[in-house]
């Protein structure tokens, strides 16, 4: 079962549930942030996008103290897969479950693009096994504080360790400055932890889960990879 965490201010929680349940046929449960434990049978945790606690202080800075995050951390420390999208990515960085930080977009604007391209840097379970290295995915973005930052030495370490999973790119797969929507260092769009079981990304795979709609269905490469991994791990 997928546990989708609900914070006050989450607004992509039900979209995530729809994508996982309707497009992929997986069982899903909404989990309110005040719960101190994850539901029995939880096999993966999803932290959705939105504006937890109204983005007061910093995005994700207050959500990290929600009771459920202690349970999420225990789950991750035990090797359970955790995926955070947009605000969920911010919460994971604030919680120390992922390296780096997410700051205001370089142009101090809110970006919204239903056809943002990202290049897959690492194709591996549990999050990108349906992809191939260098594959370009089209996944929507919508955020005002999505600029990923890390010290140069830390960024080099993450790159060498294969922890940078996605980079913003153009349609040809080139990571040019023009393809970077928010000023993220190294065009970073998604990273994972050293163990590989926690990943965060600013794009919204749950909004790219239906063929024929503007967002397309490239988000299923990521969400479907996680479903595949859980099926194999049964």
Image: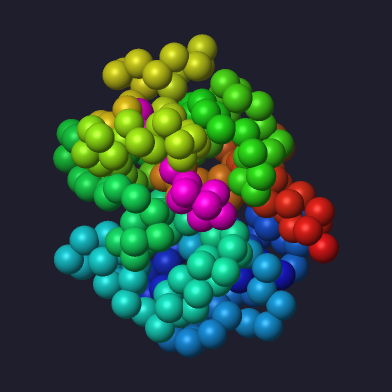
* Image x and y of residue 33, in percent: 44, 79
* Image x and y of residue 164, in percent: 44, 36
Residue in the image at 65% along x and 48% along y = 126
Q: How is the image coloured?
A: rainbow
* Image x and y of residue 214, in percent: 58, 35
166 in the magenta segment:
no
Q: Nearer the viewer, residue 68 or 154?
A: 154
Q: Is residue 141 left or right of residue 52?
A: right
Residue in the image at 56% along x and 33% along y = 122
Q: Which residues are magenta?
A: 187-198
Quadrant, the C terminus: bottom right
Q: Is residue 180 left or right of residue 126?
A: left
Q: Is residue 24 left or right of residue 102?
A: right
Residue 70 appears in the picture as rendered: yes
194 in the magenta segment:
yes
* Image x and y of residue 21, in percent: 72, 61
Quadrant, the N terminus: bottom right
Residue in the image at 62% along x and 33% along y = 123
Q: Is residue 122 left or right of residue 234?
A: left
Up the image or down, 130 lies above or below 30; here it is above
Q: Nearer the viewer, residue 37 or 146?
A: 37
Say which quarter of the image contains residue 230: bottom right
Total label count? 0
Residue in the image at 69% along x and 39% along y = 129
Residue 45 appears in the picture as rendered: no
Up the image or down, 232 lies above or below 185; here it is below
């Amino acid at each position: 079962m997928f546990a989708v965490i609900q914070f006050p201010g989450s607004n992509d929680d039900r979209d995530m549930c729809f994508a996982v349940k309707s497009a992929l046929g997986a069982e899903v449960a909404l989990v309110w942030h005040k719960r101190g434990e994850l539901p029995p049978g939880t096999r993966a945790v999803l932290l959705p996008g939105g504006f937890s606690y109204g983005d007061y202080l910093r995005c994700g800075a207050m959500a990290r103290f929600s009771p459920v995050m202690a349970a999420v951390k225990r789950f991750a420390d035990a090797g359970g897969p955790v995926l955070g999208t947009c605000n969920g990515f911010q919460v994971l960085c604030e919680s120390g479950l992922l390296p780096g930080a997410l700051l205001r977009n370089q142009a101090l604007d809110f970006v919204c693009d239903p056809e943002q391209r990202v290049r897959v840097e690492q194709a591996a379970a549990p999050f990108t096994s349906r992809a191939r290295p260098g594959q370009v995915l089209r996944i929507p973005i919508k955020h005002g504080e999505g600029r990923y930052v890390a010290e140069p030495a830390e960024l080099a370490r993450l790159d060498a360790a294969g922890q940078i999973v996605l980079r913003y790119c153009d349609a040809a797969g080139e990571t040019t400055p023009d393809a970077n929507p928010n000023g993220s260092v190294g065009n970073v769009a998604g990273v994972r932890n050293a163990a590989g079981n926690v990943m965060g990304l600013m794009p919204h795979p749950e909004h790219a889960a239906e063929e024929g709609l503007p967002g397309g269905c490239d988000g299923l490469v990521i969400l479907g990879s996680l479903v595949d991994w859980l099926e194999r791990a049964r």
